Amino acid sequence: MAIPLVIQAKAMSIRLLTIALAIVFLSTLLVSFDHDNIQPHKNGTLVLGNEVEDSMVIPLPGGAIGPESFSFDGSGGGPYTGVSDGRIIRWLANESRWVDFAVTSPQRDGCEGPRDHSKMEHICGRPLGLHFNKNTGDLYITDAYMGLLVVGPNGGLASPLTKQVDGVSFGLTNSLDIDQSSGVVYFTDSSTRFPRRNYVSVIISGDNSGRLMKFEPKTNKTTILLDNLKFPNGVALSQNGNFLLFVETTTCRLFKFWLKTPKAGKIEVIAQFPGFPDNIKRNGNGEFWVGINSRRGKFLEWIISNPWIGKSLIRVFPIDVTKVHLCLARWIAKTGMGIRLNRDGNVVEVLDSKRWKFVSEVDEDSGSLWIGSVTMPFVVKETISSL
């Protein structure tokens, strides 16, 4: 039986109204980002802004976007970065160009080229965290869909190491660091419920299925260190190996998890950031850089503290929340930031630049900062006067 036109029109009107409400809602979230003060540890000092001597914007090749994370090999070559079409590419500074280095999936048909790669990333792979084992020359990779992988010094197709722990598969394998003395890999799985392409849903729903884990190459054993986390993301090991720093993107908090000393096994909250943190990278001085994707305003903080609102948005609205957020954010959202921490993990400096959009990582190397982004089609390299 045919559906009357009046009923069809009414259903269409409800659908359009729902989409409009969703767009207004997400727009409100974006414009509510403000400049709340960072709350460093009581012993920390805060310095705003550092002099930038030179800046270079380096486009990505082949229509790719999203240089999420960086790593330099044992000879200082690179950086290497993973991009949206599943490739890991290497920067050749002497030739000022990118070259292909590795992939995380053997299925490459239809992966490359200027298109929306999110539709194929579960097939093509989406490499996020990168870190070289300087002793072996192997590059360890956390791919959002393929789990933890490794590829040799010559690149090529990466080999999977682990995709699940205690019978639960990884849902959004995200960031990692390596203990260079033991080879142990510490990494995060941001959610077991939502894939990377729906990462906004992880935040607004209050999902707490994230985990912090370690992988021991000598035994091929994966162990959960912490669970019930809200979007655990960047992770970095201290220079002496006594503790790990990691962030929860949803709560905008920085944690210290003790591995050694009499505090082993204890966890401390050491900072509350004004925006959504992504990766953490340690520099050669034993300090840390945290990339801040975007700021979190009071209204969005209220939404996150009432996860039933986000869950209702995901369940009721017939749209892709993440895609609408990204489209609006390109026009509305303010800049990201880089936050420097001292060796103990206390905030000491905040860098803010109009060139930085959706910052995923700040990696310091030889007096320069390499700025990654979740969605931008380029890498930013900043040469600074002093740190």
Image (cartoon, grey):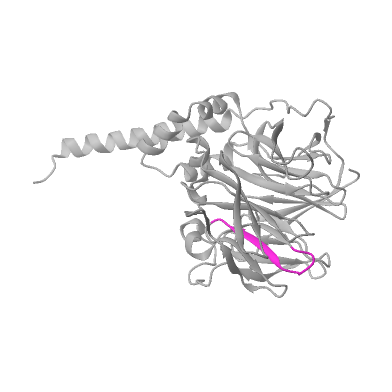
Residue for point 53% across, 60% down: 163
Residue at the extreme left of the image, as rendered: 1
Q: Is residue 205 above or below residue 386?
A: above
Q: Is residue 377 above or below residue 314?
A: below
Task: Write down the region rendered in magenta.
Answer: 133-144
Q: Position of residue 2 (x, y in %)?
A: 11, 45
77 or 342: which is nearer to us? 342
Q: Is residue 115 magenta?
A: no
The quadrant of the picture occupied by the C terminus is: top right
Q: Position of residue 113 (x, y in %)?
A: 54, 66
Residue for point 33% across, 36% down: 16
Q: Quadrant of residue 35?
A: top right
Residue for point 83% across, 39% down: 342
Q: Quadrant of residue 377?
A: bottom right
Q: Is residue 224 above or below residue 216?
A: above
251 or 13: which is nearer to us? 251
Q: Position of residue 96 (x, y in %)?
A: 78, 67
